[in-house]
Amino acid sequence: MMTRLTRTLSRAACALAVAAATLQAAPAQALSLIRDAEIEATLRRLSGPVFRAAGLDPDEVRIVILQDPSVNAFVFGGRNMALTTGLLRESDRPAQLIGVIAHEAGHIVGGHLARRQIAERNARGPVLLGLALGVAAAAAGGGPAAAAAIAGGGQAAERALLAYSRAEESAADQAALTYLERAGIDPGGMLEVLDRFRGQEVFSERHQDPFARTHPISAERLSLARARAMRSPAWGRASPPETVYWFDRMRAKLDGFLERPDRLLARLDPADGSEFARLRRAVALHRLPDPDRALAEVDKLIAMRPSDPYYHELKGQILLESGRAAQAVPAYREAVRLAPDEPLILAYLGRALLALNDPAADREARAALEQGAARSGGGDATLLRDLALAYARTGDEGMAALTTAERLAIAGARRDAVNQARRALTLLPKGSPAATRAQDIILSLQDG
């Protein structure tokens, strides 16, 4: 299920907390994070070989998707990587997107972000981008949590804080080419990206894609990368059919959710019964909204791939968002059966069950949401909101207060988070792990 979790661009400094990460936010233009189980799984498929080739544990690198039509990618806060929807949609083939991911992995392994922390601390002016991620996970496990933010403001701060030096860019290129070679992936895709943005140097900054500004591409850098890439044994190697399938399917789904539905439907041939045309059509019809026709398309997709959890999940989404929660629950249950470890699918099964407003369904929702929180690390604010409701409906006010405190901590509402954590302490058994989590939130936030 594709959802947009809005995080406000901060205009003040982002704070680091021990048990919870908070974002000090003032009113500003909003930025959306897209969460979608299928697309996130696809990005894990694409990035996994490169991360392993770089010596990184794929489970320790978090990729977030920013809803932004511009083409960009960057790393922040250690092992966190942001990719824009513009990058995902405008990459023509898997090797291009994988090449960008490999390049950003080069920045992670090279410690380039860490070396720029002094520049971040010394920056003046408003914050360009604040992004807080996954804090309640550490609180849930009793350990510390970290938040990361990229600070800056205006074009000068963007250049200072987001743009790597040319030396770091070249080093990241060479590292990326090593990772691609180890993984047996064509480096030509990365060169195609560099070629595209090398040409943008003739434009004013206002008309450049952010990637061209934040990843300065010189002729020398491009020449060095090309010479190395063309010597790779993987040069010109085609991507495996499965990789191409999931890449193309990801782009089809993004088209459905991000393009204007009337325009998308107008350009699709009604007689085209191919899988990706049906996927685009199903999502566009859902967004019109025309749920009955959308469901007809999804049922045809399920007939094509009956064991695909994401098509069952999409059916559940259409049903739930069209007010048919009772029908959505079986679709989500089937999706969970087929993909039991997908936290987002568990989360939406829980939401559909809560919509039934039935005691038995509330108990099942609580179990599904607890599993989803455990598998996701607990850092999804929407999931935590639903889990708090499930706790309240099943009579566990202490856990409801604690889960609310964790959600508020993620949102940066420090005072409210502390108040809820204090309330939880009065309701939870003394010395219990949950009580310890509540105490951790209080200690880490009350003086912040």
Image (cartoon, rainbow, N blue to C red):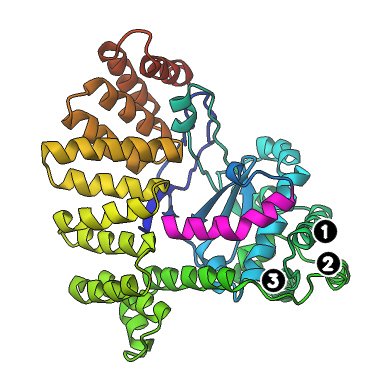
Work out whether 402 lies above or below 74. Answer: above
Amino acid type indicated by mark 1: Gln
As measured in the structure, the alpha-carbon distance from the residue carrying label 3 to the one carrying label 1 is 15 Å
Q: Position of residue 345 (x, y in %)?
A: 35, 51
| Residue placed under numbered mark 3 in the picture | 193
Amino acid type indicated by mark 2: Ala
Q: Which mark is residue 225?
A: 2
Q: Position of residue 290 (x, y in %)?
A: 20, 74
Q: Position of residue 229 (x, y in %)?
A: 83, 69
Main secondary structure along the magenta-highlighted residues: helix
Work out whether 264 lies above or below 75. Answer: below
Residue occupying the point 57% across, 40% down: 149
How busy is the neighbourhood of tag 3: few (under 14 within 10 Å), some, or many (20 plus)? some
Instruction: Give the camera-side residue of 258 and 163.
Output: 258
**Mark 2 and 1 residues: CB-CB less than 8 Å, in contact?**
yes
Q: Secondary structure at mark 3?
A: helix
Instruction: Give the camera-side residue of 437 and 346.
Output: 346
As measured in the structure, the alpha-carbon distance from the residue carrying label 2 to the one carrying label 1 is 7 Å
**Mark 3 and 1 residues: CB-CB less than 8 Å, in contact?**
no
| Residue placed under numbered mark 1 in the picture | 174
Q: Secondary structure at mark 1?
A: helix
Question: Quarter-wise, where is residue 391 in the image?
Answer: top left
**Res. 100 in view:** yes
Amino acid type indicated by mark 3: Val
Question: Quarter-wise, where is residue 370 in the image?
Answer: top left
How busy is the neighbourhood of tag 1: few (under 14 within 10 Å), some, or many (20 plus)? many
Where the N terminus falls, by quadrant?
A: bottom left
Work out whether 350 lies above or below 320. Answer: above
Point out the tag, 3 or 1, that comes first from the N-terminus: 1
